[in-house]
Amino acid sequence: MDAQTIVFAILALVSLFSGIMVVTRKNPVYSILFLVLTFFCYAGFYVLLGATFLAAIQIMVYAGAIMVLFLFVVMMLNLREPEKMEGGASFFQTLGFIVAGGFALVLMAFFAGNPGPGVPTYPPGAAAYAMGDTKELGMVLFTDYVFPFEIAGILLLAAVIGAVALAKRNRA
Amino acid sequence: MEMTLGLNHYLILAAIMFCIGMVGVLTRRNILIIFMSVELMLNSANMTFIAFSHYLMNPEGMVFTFFTLTVAAAEVGVGLAIVVTIFRKTESLDIRKLNLLKN
């Protein structure tokens, strides 16, 4: 086993553990903190895959901005009663487990085989690692994808206006 | 057994994480935790994109991930504003109390 495989295995174990913790904790604050850990693991995977720019964005946007937003909301809401987990699973919760488990089995069966014609499964060369850095990604983003980029900016503007409008309305 | 890190490892890990998020969405009742599970699913889809992008030597998967990230940020901003509005009305984050349209 080379170093890359060992790093992948460690990150995979940590992200599986923290992912399970995210969906099983009663207190949302613990879920948020475990989600931050999961996002750091994802940034590690992105580095392993050569996407260094996206790894940095992952930490700044997800682990930084979005999770702080979640924490702010949880602390602002001043939750009194924790979610009630006892009393057994309801019919729909059991159904949810079955559906998600079945979906996992289908995905496993699909991915354990050949991912598709023409898809290489061997480790690629050094060019694949250079592809994800800021310069290369910026070249693609600002030439071929400049119109979607502008649309994304408008989407963010709409989201900002929407969030302000929603938060303000109740004060009147 | 000789084991080299390949595309399938990333895909299977992303699939497992996606399904963990799916369990959270389908079984939890706290709207905030459902939101976080959705984020987990989005990130797993992103990891699949990046893994394919890396192994196919094609940067378009990373560009897609970039746009997914933008949409996720917008979604969280508006979604949390909606959660705050709901909490002011119902004093609770339980999705079972959101049955205003039922009667």
Image (cartoon, rainbow, N blue to C red):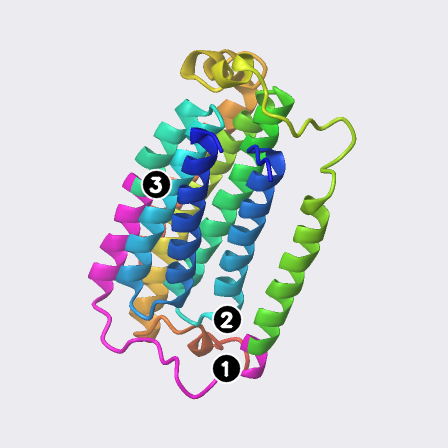
* C-alpha separation, residue under disc 3 versus residue under disc 2: 25 Å
In the rendered image, the vertical position of residue A27 relative to residue B4, given as above or below = below
* C-alpha separation, residue under disc 1 versus residue under disc 2: 9 Å
Give the letter of the chain under mark 2: B
Q: Nearer the viewer, residue A81 or A107?
A: A107
Identity, as a three-letter code, of the amino acid under mark 3: Phe
Residue depicted at 26% across the width and 78% down the height: A81
Write down the region rendered in magenta.
A64-93
Using residue A119 as the reference point, say whether residue B76 is left or right of it.
Answer: left
- On the question of residue A90 being in view, the answer is yes
The residue to which callout 1 is attached is A89
Identity, as a three-letter code, of the amino acid under mark 1: Ala
Q: Secondary structure at mark 1?
A: loop
Give the letter of the chain under mark 3: A
- On the question of residue A172 being in view, the answer is no
Marker disc for residue B27: 2
Using residue A36 as the reference point, say whether residue B103 is left or right of it.
Answer: right
Marker disc for residue B61: none
Quick one: label 1, few (<14), some, or many (20+) residues within 10 Å?
few
Instruction: Give residue A161's quadrant in the image.
Output: top left
In the rendered image, the vertical position of residue A138 relative to residue A87, given as above or below = above
Query: Which residue is at the far front?
Result: B1
Residue depicted at 72% across the width and 48% down the height: A110
Q: Give coordinates of residue A55: x percent, y percent.
A: 39, 30
Residue depicted at 39% across the width and 80% down the height: A85
The residue to which callout 3 is attached is A40
